[in-house]
Image (tube, helix red, strand yellow):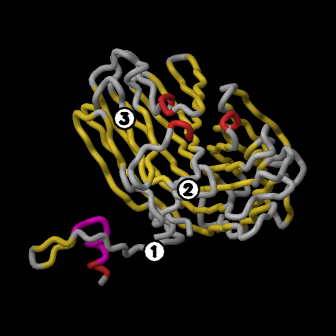
Amino acid sequence: MAGKFEKVNTFTGSSVASLTLGSIFSADYNFYNVYIRGGMTGVSDIAAERPKLKVLTAAGAEFSTGIYDFTSFELNGSNITDNNANADQDNSLLNILIAGGNTFSAHLKVFNPLSTTFYKYIWAACIGSGGYNKVGTMVKSQVAAGGLKIEVPGNTFDEIHAAVYGIKHT
Amino acid sequence: MSMLIMLKEGGTLGIDGNPIDEDIDLLPDAGGGNGKLTLIETQTLASAQAEFTLSALQADTFNTHILIGELAVDGTDGTQYEIRMQYTVGGSRITSGNQYEHRYVQIKGGSGSRSTRQSTGNFHLLREQFDDPANAKSFNIYQTIHNLGSSTLSAQQEFRGNSHSSASNSRQSIGGFNFTNTGVVQTLHIYSTATNGFATGSRVSLYGVAV
């Protein structure tokens, strides 16, 4: 229904290293809100335990690393850290967590994931136990996207949940 | 029938002891304070043009609007340009008078350089002129706009946007726009100073939110 966000799907996992949000993007919607929340055992290695966001093709394969462009303002404590990376999905961080921190959440706005003409774009507002992080991730690919994947290396999510809502403009 | 509506909206209706949980929407989609977004209009370009003009704001109904744009400029433009917004108030497009104010912070991919932009000028700056005019670009905007229908409160926007062409030229910006109203805003103008304007397929959608 035009003008109404509709639930596309919800996902949940426990004791997992990743959560796949497969087949969430379709011609039924033009724009998506994705809400993610989760927790893990307290972080010891911050660099290795930051949740990451990956984009999947319609077939469920991960996009190649060369199609991610990533910029963020990261508010950590009293500092602002600028993060940016090109062609490196390992830097497509969703959140910053402090040592010992264990809870994170994110809100993604996903533009035009099926377009084969325009670049895709995901804007994210994230918060972690010890800080605050806003992330803009641009996906350069002009290949249609089918889903998302949240993962954490070097740790597992004790629990993780995601809800996807879509809206149709046309 | 009225009793049926009262029972059903937001609850579960039981008939002969069997609960019915189907979501039956009995409320109107438009014009009410039911918390839904109302799609006012979507414009998609069938050919390149310089401007989107949105005149069906329904500002007397909605206190807040959400504007979602997926804008493209083709790679043959070859010049520096900007994406801007202006308003029509009282039948006249406001192009002078310093009623527009924008302030935002942006970060640039590649170099990671961060900068702030602020201006009191004659338009809202949705995207600054780009460093890489020779390549095709995509711009995405998500604006939450308040008070278009107010003659006393400023029209204000919360801005999230980005643009992208090559790997080193993606940008993200976050900020706010203020417009000192002299009357009800009647029309939004989103325009590009690019030689070829917005490319075919560019699209904007305007939603109303009753609050």
Q: Looking at the image, can residue B67 be seen? A: no
- Name the quadrant of the C terminus of chain A: bottom right
Q: Is residue B126 left or right of residue A108?
A: right
Tag 2 residue: A112
Check disc 3 and report its element: helix, strand or loop: strand
Tag 3 residue: A151
C-alpha span from label 1 to label 3: 41 Å
Label 3 vs 2, first from the N-terminus: 2
Residue B206's x, y, as percent?
62, 62
The three-letter code of the residue at mark 1 reads Pro
C-alpha span from label 1 to label 2: 28 Å
Q: Nearer the viewer, mark 1 or mark 2?
A: 2
Q: Nearer the viewer, residue B40 or B196?
A: B196
Residue A30's x, y, as percent?
52, 61
Q: Is residue B69 left or right of residue B85?
A: left
- Residue at position x 63%, y 54% from top? A118
Furthest-left residue in view? B17
Residue A154 lies in quadrant: top left
Residue B133 lies in quadrant: top right
The three-letter code of the residue at mark 2 reads Asn
For residue A28, which numbered disc appears in the image? Answer: none
B90 up-or-down from B101: above or below: below
Total labels drawn: 3
The three-letter code of the residue at mark 3 reads Glu
Dot 1 and dot 2 residues touching (CB under 8 Å): no
Q: Looking at the image, can residue A40 be seen? A: yes
Which residues are drawn in magenta?
B5-12
Task: Report whether mark 1 lies on the same chain as mark 2.
Answer: no
Dot 3 and dot 2 residues touching (CB under 8 Å): no
Residue A21's x, y, as percent?
36, 48
Tag 1 residue: B28
Magenta stretch encompasses residue A107: no
